[in-house]
Image (cartoon, grey):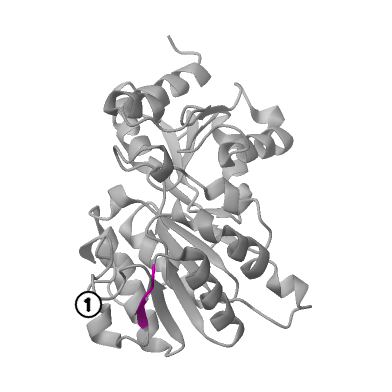
Amino acid sequence: MKTVQFREAIREAIAEEMELDKNIFLIGEEVAEYNGAYKVSQGLLDKFGKQRVIDTPIAELGFTGISIGAAMNGLRPIVEFMTFNFSLVAIDQIINSAAKMLSMSGGNFNIPIVFRGPTGSAGQLGAQHSQNFENWYANCPGLKVVVPSNPADAKGLLKTSIRDNDPVIFMESEQMYGLKGEIPEGEYLLPIGKASVVKTGNDVTILSFGKMMRVVEQTNIELIKNGIDAEIIDLRTVRPIDYKTVIESVKKTNRLVVVEEAWPLASISSEIAYHVQKYAFDYLDAPVLRVTTCDVPLPYSITLVEAFLPDVKKVYEAVKSVLYSN
């Protein structure tokens, strides 16, 4: 095992796959000469050249459309958005071209493409640069949506995503790029659609994904201090969702808290709650509780940012509530 930063794990995945397949290229704003807005692509231009690491104008709709056309013709693009907030400029191409092309072409055109970049809040970036769109993209048939929470998962899942013949939305976090963690030596892949049981437990299931796993892990420290034995699940992907692992856990613990950095309406946590009440209703000893962001645009004030986001206190209180603990 070796210890790397989250950004380094992503870079390794991209570099390894580009070495294996000459049809893979990286495209996006500042990915080449500047080495990436968050230095994810540092050194890749020197290694693979300007034909495979391509800087673009500030034109997400344009370079996304070009990349989808390239995928239709046998190439395997990795499209970096400086933030998924900017992917809204290109969402017509992602939804109406990439996601639907296999179906509309009667199976004649696969779109092997990865759209990746940071998602969610990252401090005082304002309402237009701090949104989560995991549930938006997960709502669309034809897309796979991956949200890793640590360097090891990021590398293994990105390599699998790059090799996938369907379009994959790969969502990271600006606040995780410097996060360090151990990854296996050598090549390894992780399957899309399989959750990770991070910790087994008997009292309550806590489910999350992406950056919010840090909040769950911090909360678990306090739970252990107070004798609460939580089972923790990292969903890893939100399309497809590993419902089986979630249901099996709830049947054991009889309680579920879902933590998600997203607005509450029509969220991933809403979907999870629906499936649990449908397939594990008789096992529930308390209502499913969700800890989400507040249902407002993210403010700029640091005090209001803290109030907006899920935190340890909110998750801890939700756990206490489902345990009927004072």
- Point out residue 16 in the picture as x, y percentages from the top left corner: 34, 80
| Depicted 178 relative to depicted 221: above or below | below
| Label 1: which secondary element | loop
- Find out whether residue 187 is within the magenta segment: no
| Depicted 252 relative to depicted 245: above or below | above
- Point out residue 120 in the picture as x, y percentages from the top left corner: 41, 45
Q: Which residues are magenta?
A: 53-57
Disc 1 packing (10 Å; few <14; some 14–19; many ≥20)? some
Q: Residue at x 57, y 58 (%)?
A: 91
**Amino acid, disc 1:** Gly
Give the quarter of the figure containing the C terminus: top left
Is residue 251 visible in this depiction of the protein? yes
| Depicted 130 relative to depicted 304: above or below | below
* 277 relative to 93 in the view: left or right: right
Q: Residue at x 63, y 37 (%)?
A: 266
Is the magenta region chiefly helix, strand or loop? strand
State the residue position of label 1: 43
* 84 relative to 305 in the view: left or right: right
Q: Nearer the viewer, residue 15 or 74?
A: 74
| Residue sticking out furthest to the top | 326
